[in-house]
Image: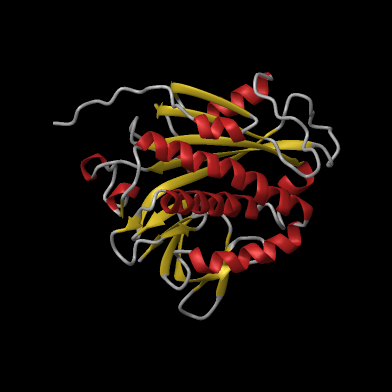
Amino acid sequence: MMIALKAATPQLPRTTAVADHVVAVDETDSTNALAVQMIGDGSLTLPDHQDGELAVAVVAADRQTAGRGRNGHKWVSQPGRCSTMSYAVRIPRAIATDESVNGWLQMIAGLVTLDALNGMIEEYGAAPNQPDCSLELKWPNDVFCHGLKLGGLLSELVIPPSSGTDADADDDVVIVFGVGLNLALGACWLPTPQSTSLQLHVTGLPSFGEMRDAVAERQVEGFRERLAKFIADPKGQAESLREEMKAVCWARGRQVEAHFTDGTTLTGEAIGLNEDASLILRTQDGTDHTVRTADVGVL
């Protein structure tokens, strides 16, 4: 019999030391929804970026009652076992709305998450318990380990109260990056057969609370550093990110099926990413297709 776990307000001393603002609650419907609401009503503000350094705010909860994924999917989490965080960052509107580069914002969130997880594992001297348990990204928004989903990411654009719909393209907007990670779930708690948890693949990890804080601290620093570089040189960084993704893109080289929101599907080999971060899928007839919005599963 499973015992219901009680939610408690996350304790995040390391994250608080590096973030510009931290909001921590024991329970909310969705950390992304709470962040969007607080930005909208002015209770969560981000200062202008000074000397190229970006402000990053964090909204954290121990339990989400209505966690969201892409395309209306639900994100199921357990208190004291799953990290549910949202990171809010101000970036120029011109970059956030430029379809030739804004797809890389989601890829940056994934790379920041991998960096944070791998950095935490190294800090505590932990190690994978199998050689094929490296962390990867399943385009466009999942963290994978051993071919299973360990986490998910969801980004949303928010117009701050000070900016109206007629604002100049140079105005800032806020991107809220929601990151859900299964850090300490036992096998019996996994929501689906396709999901997994970090503790099932890595030995020597610290307590859940320490993991959550150490990962979040690194994510704040990672978002600040990577997004500042991207803002300074979007095209150049896009090419660098494209190269970086080759090593961690789980779908690359696999036969996959893309499921589109209109109910259609497309099957082929995932070749890599285009310059705008869309997926290149090569069908059996040798034709390359561009996939921009879809759920992608391996065959």
Report x, y in % for residue 160: 72, 28
Count all numbered tags in the image, as a single digit: 0
Give the residue drawn at x 65%, y 51%: 226
Locate residue 24 relative to residue 165 in the image: left or right. Answer: left
Q: Residue furthest bottom?
A: 286
Give the residue drawn at x 48%, y 74%: 283
Eyeballing the image, is 4 above or below 55?
Answer: above
Report x, y in % for residue 272: 55, 70
Q: Nearer the viewer, residue 263 or 88?
A: 88
Q: How is the image coloured?
A: secondary structure
Locate residue 212 relative to residue 45 in the image: left or right. Answer: left
Which of the image's four quarters has the N terminus? top left
Q: Is residue 74 visible?
A: no
Give the residue drawn at x 50%, y 58%: 139
Locate residue 22 relative to residue 6 in the image: left or right. Answer: right
Report x, y in % for residue 200: 28, 50
Q: Nearer the viewer, residue 287 or 149?
A: 149
Eyeballing the image, is 50 above or below 266?
Answer: above
Q: Is residue 218 visible?
A: yes
Report x, y in % for residue 157: 65, 38
Q: Residue furthest left?
A: 1
Q: Nearer the viewer, residue 85 or 125?
A: 125
Q: Nearer the viewer, residue 65 or 8?
A: 8
Locate residue 5 relative to residue 16 in the image: left or right. Answer: left
Which of the image's four quarters has the C terminus? bottom left
